[in-house]
Amino acid sequence: MAHLERYSRQLLFSGIGEEGQQRLLNSRVLIVGVGALGTVLANHMVRSGIGHIRIVDRDYVEMSNLQRQMLFTESDVEQALPKAVAAKQMLEKVNGSVHIEAFVEDVTIQNVDRLMEGMDLVLDGTDNFKTRFLLNDACFKKGIPFGYGGAVSARGMSAFLVPEKTPCLRCFITSGASPGETCDTVGVIAPVVDIVASYQVVEAMKYLVGATDQLRRSVQTFDLWGNYDHKLKFQAPKSNCPTCQLHEYPALQVEQEAETTLCGRDTVQIATGSRFQLKEWAAKLQPIATVKETPFLLRVSLPEGEQLVLFPDGRVLVQGTEDISRARTLFSKYIGD
């Protein structure tokens, strides 16, 4: 019992106890996105004693993240650390007994199966519905629960979706809907993020300890500023749902686009499909641009005013434009086709 001392208050909670804690220690959880929601998710998962946590994020830490992304520091910004790496470093100081894996990747059709391999459930820390629908479809195809969450402005939404037991994300959110407001266009206050992620974590813990009869069977929505709270009870899945009823899984059938506009970020991501040797590219670009190299990425300030960020996995962020044509032009000029 000595090794369980750190969880003593959790053991006293009747819903978990020693048996439940042992189940948590034997659990494996994937967290996709380690930004605002993801850092809170990962913090609670590690502190509660989930035995194996895999975190995935495609971005690096910037100053504007610190207002709400609790695992990061100004030092992470100065080092331009990838979020997954910075989160892992912080979390290992919190609980060294948890096995934490960090992947600096964009979740795509090509790698989603590998990233989900061996996981008991998936928690949504993303900021876009394209990735959420990919995770939703992959989870329901594999029979793995999906803990959805979203936060923007003072509003939050969450739902815990279990294949064969509940509707899927497509049953209450239309995949073709407008992306609408984002944190980068209308802002967000940090308490909303904490609440949404806490709802996600509690449902995940219920599932992992076997308290499935206690799972919330509703979509939880609220507006902290407007004092609004609503629970939309799960209805029967839509009979024509392409994921949980027809088993077509459309997000797993669409080819990954090479260019993606990161909504509200004034950034276009370009996936090259081949890996970068950062030192080689630093040497190539230094004569014509201002280059900052870290072990994890290469930041290139261009004479035109935009900035390129190269990642080892072959992704390039073109920062300073949301125009895909402009981004592709700069990419072709400095990186090549």
Image (spheres, grey):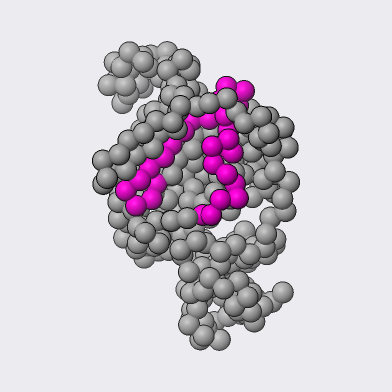
Magenta segment: 151-179
Looking at the image, residue 189 sits to the left or right of residue 132; the answer is left
Left or right, 325 with reference to 318: right
Please identify the quarter of the rendering in which residue 167 is found: top right
Residue 103, x across and y down, in percent: 55, 48
**Camera-side residue of 235 and 259:** 235
Indicate the position of residue 271 as horizontal and vertical percent values.
64, 62
For the point 53% across and 26% down, the residue is 235
Residue 75 in sight in this render: no
In the image, is residue 68 above or below residue 241? below
Q: Residue at x 43, y 63 (%)?
A: 80
**What residue is rendered at 66% in x and 29% in y?**
239
Query: In the rendering, at what x and y percent does residue 143 appear?
Result: 63, 27
Residue drawn at (67%, 45%) of the image? 251
Nearer to the camera, 41 or 276: 41
Quadrant holding the C terminus = bottom right
Q: Is residue 145 placed above or below 75 in the rendered structure? A: above
Q: Is residue 326 magenta?
A: no
Q: Relative to residue 255, is residue 206 drawn left or right?
A: left
Is any part of residue 257 visible from this angle? yes
Magenta run includes residue 172: yes
Quadrant occupied by the N terminus: top left
Task: Count up the numbered dots.
Answer: 0
Of residues 183 and 96, the one nearer the viewer is 183
Q: Residue 186: x percent and y percent? A: 37, 59
